[in-house]
Image (cartoon, coloured by chain):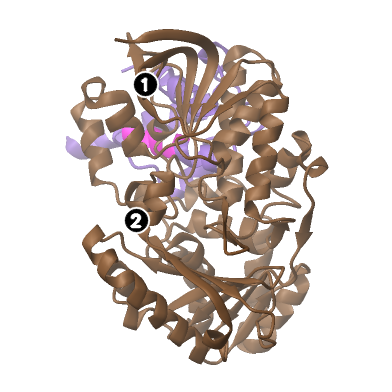
Chain colours: A brown, B purple
């Protein structure tokens, strides 16, 4: 029996970054907004947790698009700067391969010079490539919508090693090799993560999600944590509201889902509303890889730690297709690389390795073994004497990521960012259900915090446009 | 199929502007706040709706509803010619 409760202008399912940003803008415009989140804290992949006195970032570990992109604009609009300080890590990223060490500096000219010194033959092309990345014509992207990042690199460069090195951040930030990653998404990763990246909130990533949640409530929004949603109620092809786990029925004019596509349509909306062609399309779509994440709490005696705050991308061989296939198979002995991030306070080490979902039995049997296997590897490849200074160690498997965020198959980056999965408007705003919107990294080609912040802002903008209200 | 009506509906879905506001002369980028992601979404949706393939060199020519309609009509008739 449904119990009729309050009515809202908009209900947002999920307090990930995109849901929080969208909620803030809607509340700011005077709408009555509820965010219902199944987890006990806001943030989705942008959260932190505490163990034995250490604070670990769970997944997201730095922020881009802060100076020139939407992240900066949104934080300014929402006055997030009044709640937390951000500091810039310089360089933001360093790529370490068997024969090169190349960094992305706050000053892009320095980055260009560093790449030119390493690849003098490609001097002019490096200039041209970075100038394209910094200032592309918007229209070019529809023209190259079917291109992979490899197609784009081939237009510029001849040196295969350089092309592979330039693709490492894509493999790390999107889980695909350049032969599969859409050129558009690759360019976005460069613009947002590398040319404008390396920002970090004081106190850790949770501080950012908490600040947005706090702002949302100041603006009059209602946030319910530990509050799973059971159904999105649809009447005559229009959203009517949501049903919570305890059968409370909340009326709402708009519903925004910050959950993944499959959960939104198959579980919350229900297959009976959907036509078979749409169901089949979603069923054949491929999610991105998940990750195996190491969380290490360190004593203060280890002096040879890499530079804190920097994303250190290790690449062991120049074949990202092989690296991708190894990650997809879960062949950890042959992985192509990983990213190491020492927390700015130097107390913890975070390591992310692309990994497949697999089942519970597999991870139960392998989690501990893999944790020790990687500590040993990192000790020989990146941080000497690491194992002697660990006070706390744990790992997240794809199942952990799924459990905390309900992302389909623990996918780290939404749908795989291939050109054929690029841009399907029905995944953002289904044409067959009025007033239902989806936001977050499953809806279109927005990756990482810059991508989902943009989408949260854009979704709010679309709703407010319909409401004839101002941002 | 009314090409103009279908195109306006696609642009309305993607941009969030009401169909009534989207007149044939409106510029996607200047008037309808179409950005790089939305430009791709519009192109892909048009291809899907009309079962056509927009050539790379034609893409810069779609900046208004009017231009999109002209291009789609051209591509539909070319497709019909090939079939005939």
Secondary structure mostly seen in the magenta stretch: helix
Q: Nearer the viewer, residue B19 or A295?
A: A295
What residue occupies the far front of the structure in this picture?
Answer: A52
Crowd tier of the residue under label 1, counting other residues whose Cα lies within 10 Å: few below 14, some 14–19, many 20 or above:
few
Q: Are marks 1 and 2 in contact (CB under 8 Å)?
A: no
Q: Quadrant of residue A361?
A: bottom left
Q: Which mark is residue A299?
A: none
Image location (x, y in percent) of residue A46: 57, 50
- Mark 2 secondary-structure assignment: helix
Q: Is residue A27 above or below residue A397?
A: above
Residue displayed at 44% across by 86% down: A377
Image location (x, y in percent) of residue A11: 51, 21
Residue displayed at 64% across by 79% down: A299
Residue A294 can be seen in this image: yes
Q: Nearer the viewer, residue B25 or A194?
A: A194
**Left or right of A189 on screen, residue A268:** left
- Mark 1 secondary-structure assignment: loop
Q: Is residue A454 magenta?
A: no
Provide the residue designation for mark 2. A399
The span picked out in magenta is: B42-48
Marks 1 and 2 on same chain: yes
Q: Chain of mark 2?
A: A
Q: Nearer the viewer, residue A447 or B77?
A: A447
Image location (x, y in percent) of residue A292: 41, 66
Q: Is residue B43 magenta?
A: yes
Picture mark count: 2
Q: Which mark is residue A246?
A: 1
* 1 or 2: tag closer to the N-terminus: 1
Q: Is residue A213 above or below residue A339?
A: above
């Amino acid at each position: 029996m449904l119990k009729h409760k309050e009515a809202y202008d908009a209900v947002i399912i999920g307090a990930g970054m995109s849901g929080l940003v969208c909620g803030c803008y809607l509340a700011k415009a005077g709408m009555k907004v509820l965010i219902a989140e199944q987890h006990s804290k806001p943030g989705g992949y942008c959260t932190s947790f505490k163990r034995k006195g250490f604070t670990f970032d769970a997944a997201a570990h730095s922020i881009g698009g802060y100076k020139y992109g939407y992240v900066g604009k949104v934080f300014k609009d929402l006055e997030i700067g009044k709640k937390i300080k951000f500091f810039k890590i310089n360089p933001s990223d360093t790529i370490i391969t068997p024969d090169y060490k190349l960094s992305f500096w706050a000053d892009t000219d320095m980055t260009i010079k560093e790449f030119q010194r390493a690849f003098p033959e490609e001097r002019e092309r490096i200039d041209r490539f970075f100038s394209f990345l910094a200032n592309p014509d918007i229209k070019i992207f529809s023209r190259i919508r079917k291109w992979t990042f490899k197609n784009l690199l081939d237009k510029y460069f001849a040196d295969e090693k350089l092309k592979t090195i330039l693709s490492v951040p894509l493999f790390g930030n999107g889980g695909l090799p350049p032969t599969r990653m859409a050129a558009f998404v690759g360019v976005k990763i460069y613009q947002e993560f590398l040319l404008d990246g390396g920002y970090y909130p004081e106190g850790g990533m949770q501080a950012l999600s908490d600040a947005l949640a706090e702002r949302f409530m100041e603006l009059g929004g209602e946030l319910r944590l530990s509050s799973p949603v059971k159904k999105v109620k649809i009447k005559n092809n229009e959203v009517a509201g949501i049903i919570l786990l305890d059968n409370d029925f909340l009326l709402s004019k708009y519903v925004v889902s910050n959950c993944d596509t499959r959960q939104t349509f198959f579980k919350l909306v229900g297959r009976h509303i959907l036509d078979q062609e749409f169901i089949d399309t979603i069923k054949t779509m491929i999610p991105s890889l998940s990750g195996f994440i190491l969380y290490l709490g360190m004593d203060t005696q280890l002096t040879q730690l890499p530079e804190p705050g920097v994303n250190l991308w290790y690449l062991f061989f120049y074949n990202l297709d092989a690296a991708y296939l190894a990650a997809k198979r879960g062949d950890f002995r042959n992985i192509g690389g990983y990213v190491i991030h020492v927390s700015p306070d130097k107390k913890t080490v975070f390591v992310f390795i692309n990994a497949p979902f697999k089942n519970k039995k597999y991870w139960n049997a392998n989690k501990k073994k893999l944790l020790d296997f990687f500590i040993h590897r990192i000790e020989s490849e990146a941080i000497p004497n690491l194992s002697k200074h660990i006070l706390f160690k744990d790992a997240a498997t794809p199942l952990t990521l799924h459990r905390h965020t309900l992302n389909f198959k623990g996918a780290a980056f939404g749908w795989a960012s291939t050109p054929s999965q690029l841009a399907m408007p029905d995944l953002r705003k289904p044409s067959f259900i009025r007033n239902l919107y989806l936001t977050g990294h499953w809806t279109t080609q927005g990756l990482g915090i810059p991508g989902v912040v943009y989408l949260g802002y854009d979704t709010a903008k679309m709703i407010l446009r319909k409401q004839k209200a101002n941002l | 199929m009314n090409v103009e009506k279908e195109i306006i509906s696609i642009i309305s879905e993607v941009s969030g502007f009401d169909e009534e506001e989207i007149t044939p002369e409106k510029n996607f980028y200047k008037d309808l706040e179409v950005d790089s992601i939305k430009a791709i979404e519009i192109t892909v949706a048009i291809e899907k709706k009309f079962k056509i393939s927009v050539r790379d060199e034609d893409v810069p020519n779609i900046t208004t509803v009017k231009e999109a309609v002209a291009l789609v009509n051209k591509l539909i008739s070319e497709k019909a010619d090939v079939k005939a």
